[in-house]
Image (cartoon, rainbow, N blue to C red):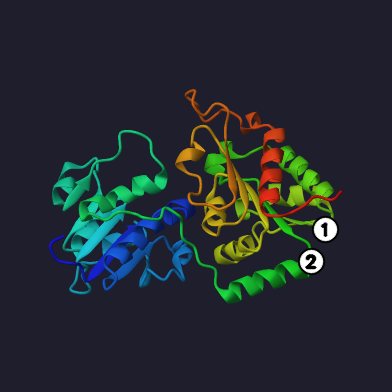
Amino acid sequence: MTNAPHSILVIIVARIGDTLLITPGLRALKIRWPNAHLTVAAHPNRRELLDGLPFIDRVLSMNKRRAPWLGHFPGHRWDLALVYGEDRPLLHYALRVSRRVIAFEQHDAVINARLSTAVAKPTQAMHAVDERSLLLAPLDIAVNSRKLAYQTLAHERETAQNWLQDRLPGTGPVFGLQPCSFPSKAYRDWPEAHFITVAEHLLRRYPTVRIVVLGGQEGRTVADRVAEKLGARAISSAGQLRLRESAALISLLDLYVGVDTGPTHIAGALDVPMVGLYHCHHPGRYLQPLEHSNGIFIEHPATDSGCPRDHSMDAINLATVERAIDTVLDNAGFAPAA
């Protein structure tokens, strides 16, 4: 841009992972223009993911049903807007309220003609952070750190610690399991029985360990069943905590083991020692946490063989996961019982 923008709007109406995947780009925008006021419009149920991030000045709630009613009358206008996604109401809103709008090329020639820059979508697969960062290329902004950003607040960690201590008292390490993705992508779930076996392996090797089985309301049945099977040293938090409360609990973990889903992105952003399991339809090399200090990310064996969604995650065998867990814990300084 010839002149530095005084105000920037970024629109991201998406699930947990997709919201966090743009945080490296948001950070790069603020580094490039530290005096610009950066506003992010996010899904009402996900906007709180961005709370506390020092490079964001304001977070708004936005969805495609609300967007058509906004921006028609004189009011705040932005110098620059970046829009992630293909929802026409969000694009039209950005075009109403910003002098310059950048988005990926759409399947609509009229919208493309109105965009300041319609960025071509990549023709080859790349990591999701790099793909989303392509919207910064017209601004000549490079993303120097590809690590996702999430910030827990002190009172949230204290509340999570109290919640855990009230329900699973102890002083030993805390390991977390995330057995379920969301229902529309349940093919990414590793078998429930495998999570139970892994947890039993951990309980044997680490006599003071406490295990929390994580998940949202939609995964509560599985999480509760796994925790019940493990006995008194395990508890399910699924469906019991709000989003930021659950993230604060994840921040307390000494180990996170989970499938490809939103909390796995949160654990990666928080740099929790972790093992991630990825389905071949969504390879880990394009989604796994980057710049992570102690993580092992396991690909489905069929990842490079044209994998449909119906390939079972059972193909990731128990021994592979247990070895990865032992390596991560060894790197973190946890010695198993003699």
Camera-nearest residue between 239 and 73: 239
Q: Residue furthest bottom?
A: 155
Q: In the rendered image, which residue does mark 1 sit on?
A: 208
Q: Residue furthest top?
A: 305
Q: Residues within 10 Å of mark 1 (few under 14, many from 20)?
A: some
Q: Residue at x 56, y 53 (%)?
A: 293
Camera-nearest residue between 41 and 93: 41
Q: In the rendered image, which residue does mark 2 sit on?
A: 171
- Viewer can see residue 295: yes
Instruction: Name which of mark 1 and mark 2 comes first in the sequence.
Output: 2
Confirm or deny contact between disc 1 and disc 2 (CB under 8 A). Answer: yes
Q: Residue at x 55, y 66 (%)?
A: 244
Left or right, residue 160 beside residue 115 = right
- Viewer can see residue 65: no
The secondary element bearing badge 1 is classed as: loop
Q: CA distance from mark 1 to mark 2?
A: 8 Å
Disc 1 residue type (three-letter): Thr
